[in-house]
Image: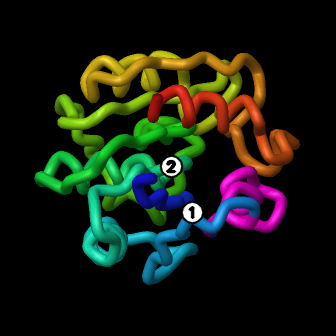
């Protein structure tokens, strides 16, 4: 089994976030620790991601949420090697809700990624409109999965362990 890296967004993922629940339930999942969860800076996050990828023996599978998606897209667009990536709710830097503290992640690299990817988006996400998710999926060569009306696909969405998300990940790896 390929190593599995969890890449959360701003603030990391709290104890009731599906990423944290996946990590707690499966020893293969490892969280990428960023230098600052609350004041993200692109180069620092990319350095942490590169170090986490280098620490595993083979190209990992990445499960990214929110700003973590943009970090992974930047990393991959610079030649970073991954086996696959599940991008959940990638935020649009042009959205009104996008945090000013994360501006260093703009612009989003809209280039084809050289590994299997899937973009998961919600129809009522204040950070990721469907048009933006579609644009990312097209550019990255990803399949787009519409999960309906579940907000930012985070702890506030009350998804629990989000079994449907695990199916999406398993299918991506299939």
Q: Which residue lies furthest to the bottom in this view?
A: 35
**Residue hosting label 1:** 29
Give the residue at x 43% y 24%. Answer: 132
Part of the protein shown in magenta: 12-24
Left or right: 158 with respect to 10? right
Q: Are marks 2 and 1 in contact (CB under 8 Å)?
A: yes
Residue 120 position, x and y percent, is 55, 28
**Residue hosting label 2:** 63
Give the residue at x 56% y 34%. Answer: 170
Q: Check residue 173 for magenta coloring.
A: no
In this view, 46 is above or below 69: below
Q: Residue furthest front?
A: 1
In this view, 167 is above or below 157: above
Give the residue at x 49% y 80%. Answer: 36
Toward which corner of the image does residue 13 lie, by quadrant? bottom right
Question: Looking at the image, how many numbered discs can be counted on the residues?
Answer: 2
Residue 171 position, x and y percent, is 53, 26
């Amino acid at each position: 089994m390929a190593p599995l890296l969890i890449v959360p967004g701003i603030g990391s993922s709290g104890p009731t976030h599906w990423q944290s629940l996946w990590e707690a339930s499966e020893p293969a999942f490892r969280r990428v620790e960023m230098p600052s969860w609350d004041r993200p800076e692109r180069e620092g996050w990319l350095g942490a991601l590169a170090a986490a990828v280098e620490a595993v023996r083979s190209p990992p599978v990445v499960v990214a949420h929110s700003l973590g998606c943009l970090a992974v897209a930047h990393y991959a667009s610079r030649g970073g090697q991954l086996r696959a990536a599940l991008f959940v709710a990638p935020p649009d830097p042009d959205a009104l809700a996008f945090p000013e503290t994360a501006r260093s992640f703009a612009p989003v690299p809209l280039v084809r990624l050289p590994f299997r990817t899937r973009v998961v988006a919600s129809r009522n996400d204040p950070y990721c409109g469907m048009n933006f998710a579609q644009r990312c999926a097209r550019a990255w060569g990803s399949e787009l999965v519409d999960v309906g009306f579940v907000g930012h696909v985070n702890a506030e969405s009350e998804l629990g362990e989000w079994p449907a998300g695990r199916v999406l990940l398993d299918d991506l790896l299939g």
